[in-house]
Image (tube, rainbow, N blue to C red):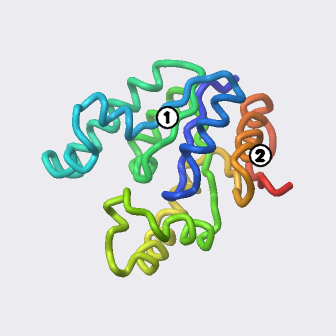
Amino acid sequence: MIHTLALCGFMGCGKTTVGKEAARQLGWRFLDLDDFIEEREGMTISEIFSKYGESGFRQRENRALQEILSTEDAVLALGGGTVLFQNNIAVLHRSGARIVLLDAPLPVLQRRLRRDTQRPLLQRPDRETFINQLFAQRMPLYRAASDAVVRITGVPEKTAALLVELVRSPDRALEQSDTT
């Protein structure tokens, strides 16, 4: 039986929205890894990067992941870079978490991120080109780290229902779409 769903995917794919809905449908807790780190450290992710650099952030991220994974029955929204690091993937797999990629098409992500003012990474004049390049770089890594893929184009409730099916029937197909 799966007790933790760890959602990965590109920014704007719906990890938080879908994760909260899946947790509600399962009667589980929802946790956002970045929010957890910020609360635990008493500073924003940007401040942590500024003060400790990426390696300092990644150390804190790995410790937070281990702490979160000691609890059961949770849907966890991972940060965009979490599964880009093997030590984080190892921690997730050792815990028995099922890593699920929420795979949204690039045009959908471009549309969702067009007016985003919250993500520091996107506050640049070449936003669309940058998103295209980052997407091309990260998606193969997300796929490699994932135990299952859910292609999303529809409504969060349908995507969440597919995640619930993955928990209840862990042997189901590894790739699904919320349009079926």
Kind of residue indicated by mark 1: Leu
Residue 134 falls in image quadrant? bottom left
Q: Nearer the viewer, residue 143 or 155?
A: 155
Q: Nearer the viewer, residue 178 or 101?
A: 178
Kind of residue indicated by mark 2: Lys
The answer to whether marks 1 and 2 mark residues whose Cβ atoms lie closer than 8 Å is no
Instruction: Give coordinates of residue 137: x percent, y percent.
Output: 46, 69
Is label 1 or label 2 in front? 2
In the image, residue 110 sits, relative to residue 34, either above or below, namely below
Q: Relative to residue 28, is residue 180 drawn left or right? A: right
Which disc is residue 158 wearing? 2
Q: Nearer the viewer, residue 161 or 98?
A: 161
Quarter of the figure with the N terminus: top right
In the image, residue 117 sits, relative to residue 36, either above or below, namely below
Instruction: Give coordinates of residue 55: x percent, y percent.
Output: 22, 48
Q: Residue furthest left?
A: 51
In the image, residue 90 sits, relative to residue 69, either above or below, namely below
**Circle 1 is placed at which residue position?**
92
How many angstroms separate mark 1 from mark 2 (CA)? 25 Å
- Name the residue at 54% across, 71% down: 110
Instruction: Give coordinates of residue 135: x percent, y percent.
Output: 50, 68
Q: Residue furthest right?
A: 180
